[in-house]
Image (spheres, grey):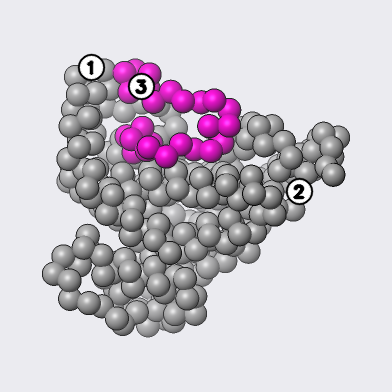
Amino acid sequence: MQTMEDFEQQIKAFAADIDTELKGGQINFPTVFDLSLRIKRLADDPNSSLNELAAVVRAEPLLSAKVLRMANSLLLNPYQKEITNLSAAVSRIGSSTLRCLAFAVAADQLERDHRSRQMRLVASGLWMHSIDVASWAYAFSRHLERGNADTALLSGLMVSIGQFYLLAKATDYPALEGELVHFAEFVMLWDEPVKRAVLEAFELPEEIVDAVEICADGSTEWPPRELSDIIFLATLAAETPNPFADLLGIRNRPEMLDACLGAAGRVEFESLLEAARLTRQQMLTAVSAS
């Protein structure tokens, strides 16, 4: 049985481990991120082919199923001509969405890795929150015709990447699952510096890095013009709570809406929510389906 003393010892060791990684500039990705990293490297390599990407996808049955389901969804395949070839499916969904689906597989593995029911619920809740934000970002980008919707989808998913990384690394420190509120405080404290380090290690485009970092400032304008505005609005729109914020009692959506958008902006935002809701639901279903 783990004690509070065990928790304090392990949280100090965990903090020291993360601090060493950040200062050394060397992020050691847990194995659950392996697939995401392989997809990223191939997608970024101008010399790689569509068939090479499809081969990586084909080796992962869960990812294969998600890719085919996404390619055949009404959202991306409105004429419903069934796609059964993985290369064609990868081509249809695009590299940004493929990265999101690879991350979905990582999230599924992360949920299964944790030994306690509580930690599995946290992992599952964080994934559902992440794809909720990402799906709203995609829908807002499409309905407002601001930027590339696939880029918005990937950016929305990256908002919680630091928390995912910390949750995955916490598997090595079993005492942490016995004090979830204290663990949530730790995650929220380290979230931003870890997120920045992970985004840099992923070598994501500067546009995405800036959008994900700026959205934490709590400021935007109406109508939204930049990707950062889209992502911030998506975090406000998310209906599935972040489990770490929920553990700490952080529920401030109405106050943030008033402070950031004002009365007129909030009315416009509510209209946007209704207009984009179906697109958001279609993307949410396509990404979350197993």
- Residue 83: image quadrant is bottom left
Residue 11 seen in the current view: yes
Marks 3 and 2, the one that precedes in the sequence: 2
Q: Is residue 101 left or right of residue 80?
A: right
Label pair 2/1, CB-CB below 8 angstroms: no
Q: Position of residue 68 (x, y in %)?
A: 33, 73
Q: Which numbered marker is on residue 254?
A: 3
Specify the amino acid type for callout 3: Pro
| Residue denoted by label 1 | 263
Let me know if residue 281 is in the magenta part: no
The answer to whether residue 27 is seen in the rendering is no
Q: Where residue 32 appears, x then y in whole percent?
A: 59, 62
Task: Give the mark nearest the N terminus, 1 or 3.
Answer: 3
Q: Is residue 205 above or below residue 60?
A: above
Q: Secondary structure at mark 3?
A: helix
Few, some or many C-alpha atoms within 10 Å of disc 1 (few <14, some 14-19, many ≥20)? few
**How many C-alpha atoms fall within 10 Å of the one at disc 2: few (<14), some, or many (≥20)?**
some
Q: What residue sits right under mark 2 in the picture?
A: 173
Q: Nearer the viewer, residue 30 or 196?
A: 30
- Is residue 79 placed above or below 131 in the rendered structure? below
- C-alpha distance separating marks 2 and 1: 46 Å
Tell which circle, 2 or 1, labels the residue nearer the N-terminal end: 2
Q: From the top left corner, tell me how far across and down residue 140 is, in percent.
A: 24, 43
